[in-house]
C-alpha cells in the first residue's frame, strides 16, 4: 500500500513525525513520491520542502537525522505517520519538537 | 499568535489531532481561518474539508466530537497540534485513530 500522490494537485502527502520512545509529536512535513520512496528504502526521513522546492534529507546538514522505526498510513491514504528515533532536536530552533508554543492554553479545571 | 493562513495559496493549515490522555495521534485535517476561529471559540474541533469543500464540525453527524484541551503551533506557524478529549472514535471506519495500518513495519531487532 502506498500513499495516494495523485489525490491532490500538488502531489504532496503530509507526514506527521513522532518520537517512537516518548510518542511526542516532533514535526509535520510533506513527502512527494521520490522522498517517500527514499524514506522507505533508507529508513531515514526524507521530505519535500515546499518553501525551498527541493528534496530534503532531514539532518543532512544539522546531523539531526531521524531513523524510521515504522510508518503508518491513514484511512483514506493521504496522510502518513512516521515513528522515529531522532539523532537530535527536530526543530531548527533547537527545540526537541517544532510544537513548543501554546496558543490556546488548557482551561483551569473547575473544582 | 495565529497560524499564517497567507503562507500557501490554498489558505489552509494542517492540523494534527492527538488524544490528550493517551497521546495517540488520532487524525490530521486542515483548518481555514473560519474553522480555526470556530475551534478557538467553541473548544471543539472544526476543520475545512478539502474533498467536500465545506466547513466541517467534527462529530456533528456521528456524535464523535472532540473537546479541545489545548492548541500548540509550530516554529514557522503553519501547522497546528490540537490536544483533545474525543467523545468517540476519530475515524469514520470506527477505529480510534485514522492511522490503524502499518506500511513499513518495525524491523526485527538484531540480537
Image (tube, coloured by chain):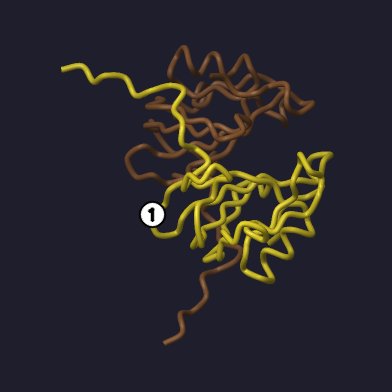
Chain colours: A brown, B yellow
Viewer can see residue A95: no
Image quarter of the C terminus of chain A? bottom left
Chain letter of disc 1? Answer: B
Q: Give residue B23's position: percent from left, percent from top.
A: 42, 52
Seen in the picture, residue B3 relative to A9 is either above or below; the reply is below
The answer to whether B22 appears left or right of B95 in the picture is left
Which residue corresponds to the image point at 54% horizontal and 39% vertical from the top-left?
A92
| Residue B44 or residue A109, whichever sits in front | B44
Q: In the image as oriented, which residue stretches furthest toward the bottom? A: A111
Q: In this view, does B15 lie to the left or right of B25?
A: right
Task: Tell me which residue sits at (34%, 24%) in the image.
Answer: B106
Identify the residue shown where x is 65% and y is 21%: A32
Q: Looking at this rendering, what residue extends furthest in the left direction?
A: B111
Q: Position of residue A35 (x, y in %)?
A: 59, 18
Q: Residue B45 versus residue A60: which sits nearer the camera?
A: B45
Q: Tell how many labels.
A: 1
Please, what secondary structure does the residue beneath circle 1 have? loop
Using residue B12 as the reference point, say whether residue A94 is left or right of it.
left
The residue labelled by disc 1 is: B22
- The answer to whether one can see residue B83 in this image is yes
Q: Where is residue A58 in the image (x, y as percent from the top left)?
A: 52, 26
Residue A19 in percent (x, y) is at 40, 39
Circle 1 packing at 10 Å, graded few (<14), some (14-19), many (20+), is few
Q: Quadrant location of residue B53? A: top right
Between A100 and A93, the one lying in front of the other is A100
Residue at the location (50% across, 57% down)? B88
Amino acid at each position: 500500500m502506498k500513499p495516494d500522490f495523485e489525490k491532490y494537485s500538488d502531489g504532496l502527502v503530509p507526514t506527521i513525525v513522532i518520537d517512537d520512545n516518548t510518542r511526542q509529536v516532533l514535526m509535520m512535513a510533506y513527502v512527494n513520491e521520490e522522498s517517500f520512496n527514499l524514506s522507505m528504502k533508507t529508513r531515514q526521513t526524507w521530505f519535500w520542502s515546499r518553501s525551498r522546492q527541493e528534496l530534503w534529507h532531514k539532518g543532512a546538514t544539522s546531523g539531526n537525522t531521524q531513523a524510521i522505526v515504522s510508518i503508518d498510513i491513514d484511512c483514506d491514504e493521504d496522510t502518513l505517520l512516521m515513528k522515529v528515533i531522532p539523532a537530535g532536536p527536530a526543530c531548527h530552533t533547537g527545540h526537541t519538537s517544532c510544537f513548543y508554543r501554546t496558543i490556546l492554553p488548557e482551561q483551569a479545571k473547575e473544582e
